[in-house]
Amino acid sequence: MYLFAVLLCVLCGAVYEYFSHEVFSYYMLYAFAFPLVGGVFPYFYMALSGCRLPSGLSYNLYNSGIAALTVGSIFNGVLEIYGTTNKLVCVYWIAGAALIIFGIIFFLFSPKQKRRN
């Protein structure tokens, strides 16, 4: 699922910047990094190493945090390409970071469960 999100971010960023008259934003260009670094790499490592995978609340919080950071990056890139700013963009970064931190905390302090198949 995260690989699909990475490809979708790369494709949308490339199409958007192609039609933006050579104006680009690093937020839009590197929006794919959040699902790649926060989704593909950790879950790939957990699957290969045999670690338990997150479940329940920790799984939902962590994935929501990655989604908030990705959407926030794309939204910030759109605003930057358009040539404007908005103070409320920081809500994406704060909410995304908080959700990821709480997801990790719930994962670390949850009872041990069997591995997902």
Image: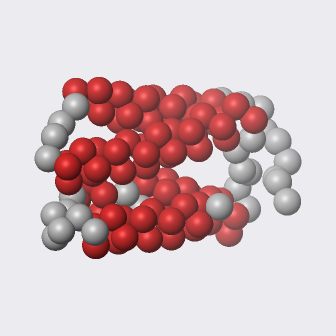
Residue 9 visible in the shown view: yes
Compared to residue 35, the image places residue 100 above or below, namely above
Residue 101: give x, y in percent of width and height: 49, 33
- Foreground of the two, 102 or 78: 78
Image quadrant of residue 88? top left
As rendered, which of 74 and 30 lies closer to the eye? 74
Residue 117 versus residue 29: which sits nearer the camera?
A: 29
Q: Residue at x 51, y 70 (%)?
A: 7
List x then y, in percent, for residue 91.
35, 28
Can you tell which quarter of the image residue 3 is in? bottom right
Q: Residue at x 67, y 41 (%)?
A: 59
| Residue 75 percent across, percent down from the top left | 34, 45
Q: How is the image coloured?
A: secondary structure
Q: Is residue 89 left or right of 57 when viewed as pictured?
A: left
Q: Quadrant of residue 15?
A: bottom left
Nearer to me, 86 or 56: 86
